[in-house]
Image (cartoon, grey):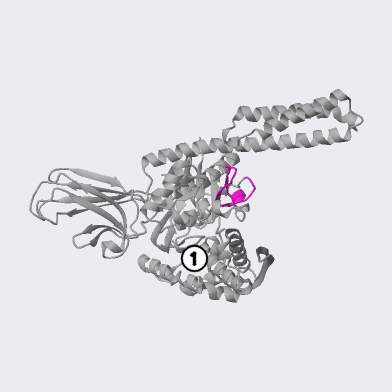
């Protein structure tokens, strides 16, 4: 049976986990890393790189490299390269495919099902976009769960005592805070709040701006006009940020950043933690509002919290930890790994959903539906409304409502003898429709003509356990009904998803062929190098026939390699290269003793 994996699809790094012997374990990538950079790159040779390989060449190939695509989820942003345009879902699917492949290598079999996490403050379109990315990657996404909830689930496996905890999740691109109650095998989210555009990327950008300003003033060169130079500055900014989490100073050295009038630009600078805190104070202060709002929505004070859990790499910043202490009066807990706990919680939920066993603190095994089974109660992060007369956002579902949600309300027509109405579905907390996010529109027709206010139209909101919304409108008189699963203009259509799935499968096959070709070329280059060495060394010792045979086999292999076109080559072409390399190795092996 296929195992269910848990995936933390992060802005900067992603992580994948699976339950083994009742406990979530992290699945290492092909390089042994426990997290994988959420980076995708397209080389000029047509190869697609994901993860560490993409990150390594980002400086020299910055224009063809995508980072932080998570921030684009649920938008109409596109990444164009080589005449092809990619959506955020398709780029995310490439990262998910990489994680899926690493999981299959680790488990020794196919992986088809996953639980994927999203920021708690992701709206409906962003959640659906994440689920679509999973489909494109060849995964059946059993559940979309909120990242802080997933972290709390990982924490709750070892800390099942009755308590209220706050999960403070500051990652690479998003910030979430959730107040969660744990106890009796139940993990219940009381409230959640956050900021989808606050994370480590913003800290990096502030430091990058400082370094660019210093370089301009010292060398009259603006790195922002040179993509390769700018990428080096950004990488240095990120590294300095990390160093300042444990040191008071970070030394930055960027030799030969560029050349100005033939002279090299060498930049050196020491960034202090004090200066870093000054530069980023406004970002850290932005975490205060969501913390206070989450506590208020949960109806508790900070003193009632049993624990504050730090999640996300950016919580390693000392000033962030100081802010947590100031806001909660608690020493933040570091009992779980901030980079790995979200994926571990997702794996635990995957085991729950698939009937797998989990070992809780104390050694008890938990199974869904059993007396000690874990029950996860999540919430919808934003209020849901419909637009009514005067542009008012009439709320049907309050934020922090426990999932799943089913709610209906009766509306009527605003003008006499209307035969149809438009339903504009909104997400947000503002009283006017124009100030909220419109996440979908549809029209209900066939209404019996009558004076304004007479027809009765029932609007129903159904939100499933993934936080994905379906809206239905029904005329109670004519029984006419219309419904949509919210799509919005930024969501991919079913036909686009199907096309992307086919594309992903085709590219996966091409990537496999390219890898085989690279391996075959490596074998061929080694064979050629050894044969040329033997030919050079045996100039006077080898017979004319042996020299002729060696030269013929070398020439045959060189011609095969020169004629290769990676995009047009199949397994038979690669086999011919391997066969020619084998023949050359055989000939060289026969001639080697005589050449010595």
Farthest front residue in view: 261
Residue 538 vertical placement versus 295 (above, below): above
**Secondary structure under the numbered disc 1 in the rendered image:** strand
Between 53 and 544, the one lying in front of the other is: 544
Residue 497 vertical placement versus 76 (above, below): above
Count of numbered tags:
1
Q: Residue 374: x and y, percent?
A: 44, 50
Circle 1 crowding by C-alpha within 10 Å: few under 14, some 14–19, many from 20 = some
- In the image, taking residue 350 as reference, residue 218 lies left or right, namely right
Q: Is residue 210 visible?
A: yes
Residue 349 vertical placement versus 507 (above, below): below
Between 40 and 102, the one lying in front of the other is: 40
Q: Is residue 108 visible?
A: no
Farthest top residue in view: 545
- In the image, taking residue 454 as reference, residue 94 lies left or right, namely right
* Image point (77%, 34%), residue name: 528
- Residue under label 1: 307
- In the image, taking residue 490 as reference, residue 583 lies left or right, namely right
Residue 387 falls inside the magenta stretch = no
Between 217 and 341, the one lying in front of the other is: 217
Look at the image and tell me in which quarter the C terminus lies: top right
Q: In which image quadrant can residue 254 be found?
A: bottom right
Q: Residue 207: x and y, percent?
A: 56, 69
Q: Residue 127: x and y, percent?
A: 40, 51
Q: Residue 172: x and y, percent?
A: 52, 60
Q: In which image quadrant can residue 212 be found?
A: bottom right
Between 488 and 185, the one lying in front of the other is: 488
* Image point (35%, 50%), residue name: 468
Residue 568 vertical placement versus 364 (above, below): above
Q: Which residues are magenta?
A: 30-54
């Amino acid at each position: 049976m296929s195992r269910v994996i848990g995936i933390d699809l992060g802005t900067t790094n992603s992580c994948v986990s699976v339950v083994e012997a009742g406990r979530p374990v992290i699945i290492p990538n092909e390089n042994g890393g426990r997290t994988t950079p959420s980076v995708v790159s397209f080389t000029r040779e047509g190869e697609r790189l994901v993860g560490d390989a993409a990150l390594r060449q980002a400086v020299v190939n910055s224009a063809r490299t995508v980072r932080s695509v998570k921030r684009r989820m649920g938008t109409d942003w596109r990444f164009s390269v080589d005449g092809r345009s990619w959506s955020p879902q398709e780029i995310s699917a490439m990262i998910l495919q990489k994680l899926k492949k690493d999981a299959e290598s680790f488990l020794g079999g196919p992986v088809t099902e996953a639980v994927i996490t999203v920021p708690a403050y992701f709206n409906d379109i962003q959640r659906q976009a994440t689920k679509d990315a999973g489909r494109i990657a060849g995964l059946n996404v059993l559940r979309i769960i909120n990242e802080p909830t997933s972290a709390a689930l990982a924490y709750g496996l070892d800390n099942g005592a009755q308590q209220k905890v706050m999960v403070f999740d500051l990652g690479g691109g998003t910030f979430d805070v959730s107040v969660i109650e744990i106890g009796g095998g139940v993990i219940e989210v009381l409230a959640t709040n956050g900021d989808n555009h606050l994370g480590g990327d913003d800290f990096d950008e502030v430091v990058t701006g400082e370094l660019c300003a210093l370089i301009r003033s010292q060398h009259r060169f603006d790195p922002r006009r040179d993509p390769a130079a700018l990428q080096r500055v950004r990488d240095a900014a990120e590294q300095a940020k990390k160093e300042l989490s444990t040191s008071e100073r970070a030394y930055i050295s960027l030799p030969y950043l560029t050349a100005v009038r033939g002279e090299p630009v060498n930049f050196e600078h020491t960034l202090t933690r004090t200066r870093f805190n000054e530069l980023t104070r406004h970002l850290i202060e932005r975490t205060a509002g969501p913390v206070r709002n989450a506590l208020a929505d949960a109806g508790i004070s900070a003193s009632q919290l049993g624990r504050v859990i730090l999640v996300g790499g950016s919580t390693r910043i000392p000033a962030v930890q100081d802010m947590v202490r100031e806001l909660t009066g608690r020493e933040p807990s570091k009992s779980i790994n901030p980079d790995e706990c979200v994926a571990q919680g997702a794996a635990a939920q995957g085991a729950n959903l698939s009937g797998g066993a989990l070992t809780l603190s104390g050694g008890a095994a938990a199974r869904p539906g059993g007396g000690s089974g874990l029950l996860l109660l999540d919430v919808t992060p934003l209020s849901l409304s419909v637009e009514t007369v005067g542009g008012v956002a009439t709320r049907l579902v309050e934020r922090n409502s426990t999932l799943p949600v089913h709610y209906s309300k009766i509306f009527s027509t605003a003008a006499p003898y209307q035969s149809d109405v438009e339903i504009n579905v909104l997400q947000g907390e503002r009283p006017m429709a124009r100030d909220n996010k419109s996440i979908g529109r549809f029209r209900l027709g066939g209404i019996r003509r009558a004076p304004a206010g007479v027809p009765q139209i029932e609007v129903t909101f159904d939100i499933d356990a993934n936080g994905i919304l379906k809206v239905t409108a029904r005329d109670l008189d004519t029984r006419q009904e219309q419904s949509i699963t919210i799509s919005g203009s930024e969501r991919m259509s079913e036909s686009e998803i199907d096309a992307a799935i086919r594309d992903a499968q085709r590219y996966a096959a091409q990537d496999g062929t390219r890898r085989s070709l690279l391996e075959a070329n490596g074998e061929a280059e080694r064979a050629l190098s050894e044969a040329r060495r033997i030919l050079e060394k045996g100039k006077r010792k080898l017979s004319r026939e042996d020299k002729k045979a060696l030269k013929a086999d070398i020439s045959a292999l060189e011609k095969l390699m020169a004629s290769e076109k990676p995009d047009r080559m199949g397994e038979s072409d690669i086999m011919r290269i391997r066969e020619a390399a084998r023949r050359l190795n055989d000939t060289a092996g026969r001639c080697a003793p005589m050449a010595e």
